[in-house]
Image: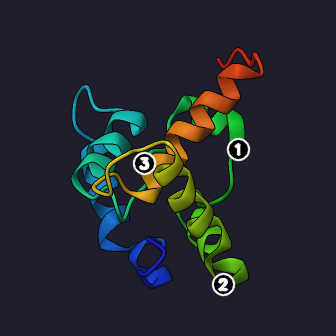
Amino acid sequence: MVDAGALVVADGSPAEQAWSLLSEQYGVNWVIAGKILARKRPRLLPVYDRVVRCAVGRPSSFWLALHVALREDDGALHRQLLKLRQAAGVAETVSALQVCDVAVWMNHRAVGHACP
C-alpha cells in the first residue's frame, strides 16, 4: 500500500468496486468482504473490521487514511512496522499491513476496550 498510488484505494477504484461486489453477496458483510480482500492482497489492502474501527474510528475512507499515514514523514510509520516485524521475528512474507493489524488489535484489547 505504501508504494501504491492513492488511486488504487480511492472511491471508485478496482479495490473499492471489488469490496462493493463482495459485500452485496448473500452472507457477506462489510467485515468479511474486507477480510477477503486483505487476504488476497495483504500488501495492498488492510483489514478493517469492528475492532480496528473501534480503535481508530470511522474515517471517511480508512484505506485512504492509512495510505496517507504510511507515506507521511517519508514513510516513518511503514518503517516502524517493518522494524516491529523484525523485532518480533516474523517472516518477511508478512506484510507491514498485517503487522499493523495485529498491533492495533493487541494494543486495543490490552487497554481493555470492549468493542461492540
> For residue 109, what is the image quadrant?
top right
- Percent position (x, y) of residue 107? 68, 31
- Give the image location of residue 92, x and y in percent: 32, 57
- Front residue (pair 100, 14): 100
Element under disc 3: helix
Give the residue pinned by disc 1.
56
- Quarter of the image with the C terminus is top right
For the residues marked 2 and 3, what is the alpha-carbon distance in whole angstroms? 20 Å
Judge from the rendering whether residue 55 lies leftward or rightward of residue 105; answer left or right: right
Give the residue at mark 3: 98
Looking at the image, is mark 2 or mark 3 earlier in the sequence? 2
* Above/below status of 15 relative to 90: below
First-in-chain label (1 vs 3):
1
> Height in image: 63 above or below 58?
below
Mark 1: few/some/many CA within 10 Å (<14, 14-19, 20+): few
Quarter of the figure with residue 72: bottom right
Pick whichever of labels 1 and 2 is earlier in the sequence.
1
Q: Which of 60 and 24 is in front in this view?
A: 60
Q: Element at badge 1?
A: helix
For the residues bearing labels 1 and 3, Cβ distance under 8 angstroms: no
Give the CA distance from mark 1 to mark 3.
16 Å
Tag 1: amino acid:
Val
Residue 103 drawn at (x, y percent): 58, 40
Residue located at (46% from left, 58% from top): 96
Query: Of 70 and 17, which appears nearest the observer?
Result: 70
Q: Where is residue 53 in the image (x, y as percent from the top left)?
A: 62, 38
Labelled disc at residue 31: none
The label nearer to you, 1 versus 2, is: 2
Q: In this view, does 98 lie to the left or right of 115?
A: left
Report the Cα–Cα distance between label 1 and label 2.
22 Å
